[in-house]
Amino acid sequence: MSDLISYIKLPLTASIKILPHGVPELIFLNSSSYSALDFKVCAPSFHHDIHLCPTYKQVTIDYTIIDTVHGPYINTVHPVFNLIPQLLGNFLKGCYDHLGHPSLECGSIWSVYHNILSAVWR
């Protein structure tokens, strides 16, 4: 019975939250304000985002290692990679090509999305 009583008295929430609740952009910019852990890493292709989050940890990514792992462990023809029908994918690629291949970055992804969406509606 004493074990049951001690179990009932356990706290219901964790002191360190892995999945925070709040506005995603604010959580991204300042995770410590939301009692969340910050796992952001600055990869070479994302240096432009350093000004958004000066707490980024800078790392070097060896893409040859990624390619080495990609070959034997990732089956690119597996159905999980066919998220949209090929005809739609080709159409969206054409819209993206028409826009001039804008870079997809943290600060520009939504504007690129809206531009592709407006190209789809034309």
Image (cartoon, rainbow, N blue to C red):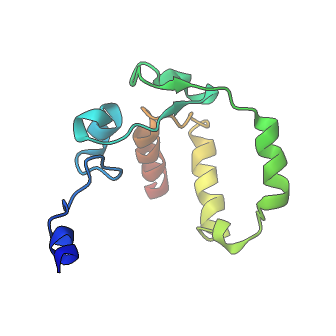
Tally of numbered tags: 0
Q: Where, by quadrant of the figure, is residue 78 drawn?
A: bottom right
User: For this view, does 33 lie left or right of residue 61?
Assistant: left
- In the rendered image, residue 97, in percent from the top left (x then y), is placed at 63, 43
Q: Is residue 67 above or below residue 44?
A: below
Q: Is residue 74 above or below residue 104?
A: below
Residue at the spot x=60%, y=43% of the render?
A: 98
Check the picture and name the quadrant holding the N terminus: bottom left
User: For this view, does 70 lie left or right of residue 26?
Assistant: right
User: For this view, does 46 lie left or right of residue 38?
Assistant: right
Q: Residue furthest front?
A: 2
Residue at the spot x=44%, y=43% of the render?
A: 115
- In the rendered image, residue 60, in percent from the top left (x then y), is placed at 67, 26
Q: Residue furthest bottom?
A: 1
Residue at the spot x=31%, y=36% of the render?
A: 31
Residue at the spot x=52%, y=32% of the render?
A: 41
- In the rendered image, residue 100, in percent from the top left (x then y), is placed at 61, 35
Camera-nearest residue between 94 and 61: 61
Camera-nearest residue between 108 and 19: 19
Camera-nearest residue between 76 and 120: 76
Q: Is residue 43 above or below residue 5?
A: above
